[in-house]
Amino acid sequence: MTTSSDAPRAPHGRAVLVTGASTGLGRACALHLEHTGFRVFAGVRKDTDGKELAEESAHGRIVPVLVDVTDETSVRAAAARIGDELGPGRALFGLVNNAGVCVSAPLECVPPERLRWQLETNVVGQLAVTQAFLPHLRRSRGRIVNVTSGLGTVALPYLGAYAAAQFAKEAMSDVLRRELRGFGVTVSVVQPGAIMTPIWQKVSEVARDALRAADGTVGELYRARFEQFLAQNEQAARDSRTTPQDMARAVARALTEARPRTRYRVGGDVRRLSVLARLLPDPLLDRYLRPLTG
């Protein structure tokens, strides 16, 4: 016998917000959730991105919303806009915290302002968005889905700033899950592995900027190995069989399954790293990762 608590949550009639929906994983997620029946508020930073996404909408259920997660005024304005769009007596059911940036560089070469940008976008901004929409989510007994990555489990060389943000977002997700359980709000993490999206071009641009900005002597110490790492990393994404649609389907499951899991790992590389992190002592894990540093 199936009880009401065991029944999947039907998408139809429910509204979700996806941040970082302009490109890549966020865009794929917004389109997939609309396809499954959700009404999707797609968080974008530019009007042009929102218009393009709305034009790609198959069912007219994508509503672009301007939001910069690092700007509290922008976040509050987005919350007010979505509240107005939903109307009295209705509340947002799902929040997908996907917006993020990736700083890749040897930690010795990461300027403090770049680290602040990484943390402000991937951690502080995500919490600001969550806080703004928690009144909605409590009323709807809704769901939060935080998108991190495999680097929230294992910190890879040359991705220290990004891994620090992902570890922090994982910890924040655990705390939110425990604090919000009594309100009927669930919190799940989706950890996608290497997927070929436009982010890889941005990663390489930011990485090379960081190396150029570093002290000349220090930058040269790392340059050859770091360039090799960037090439290997991008090739791994190109070779990956994991797609943006795989990640989008995991988000949809977290929003609709009767008993959502705390973590959804998407891709063989993420699952493999998760197992290695649990089984290997640090020296052996370091040895496994050593080829990344040349």
Image: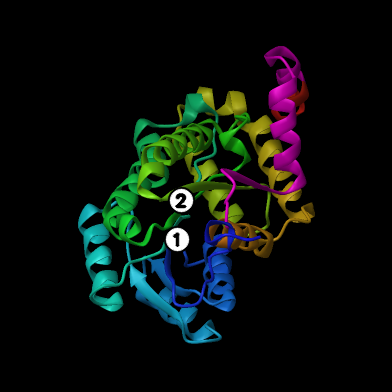
Measured from the top left, where is residue 248 in percent x and y? 61, 62
The residue sitting at 64% across, 62% down in the picture is 249
Q: Is mark 1 on a helix, strand or loop?
A: loop
| Front-lying residue, 66 or 246 | 246
State yes or no: discs 2 and 1 in contact (Cβ < 8 Å). Answer: yes
Disc 1 marks a residue whose amino acid type is Gly
Image quadrant for the N terminus? bottom right
**Is residue 275 highlighted in magenta?**
yes
Q: Residue 51, located in which quarter of the rendered image? A: bottom left
Measured from the top left, where is residue 68 in percent x and y? 32, 58
Disc 2 marks a residue whose amino acid type is Gly
Ranked by sequence position, the earlier of labels 2 and 1 is 1
Q: Mark 2 points at which residue?
A: 100
Q: Name the residue under label 1.
A: 20
Measured from the top left, where is residue 101 in percent x and y? 47, 49
Label for residue 226?
A: none
Q: In this view, does 189 lie above or below 175?
A: below
State the count of labels.
Answer: 2
Q: Is residue 195 above or below residue 168?
A: below
| Stretch of the chain drawn in magenta | 258-287
Q: Is mark 2 on a helix, strand or loop?
A: loop
Measured from the top left, where is residue 219 in percent x and y? 54, 28
Image quadrant for the C terminus? top right
**Is residue 28 highlighted in magenta?**
no
Q: Residue 289, located in which quarter of the rendered image? A: top right
Near mark 1 (Cα within 10 A), the count class, few <14, some 14-19 or many ≥20, is many
Apparent side of residue 60 relative to residue 156 in the rendered image (left or right):
left
Apparent side of residue 287 relative to residue 104 in the rendered image (left or right):
right
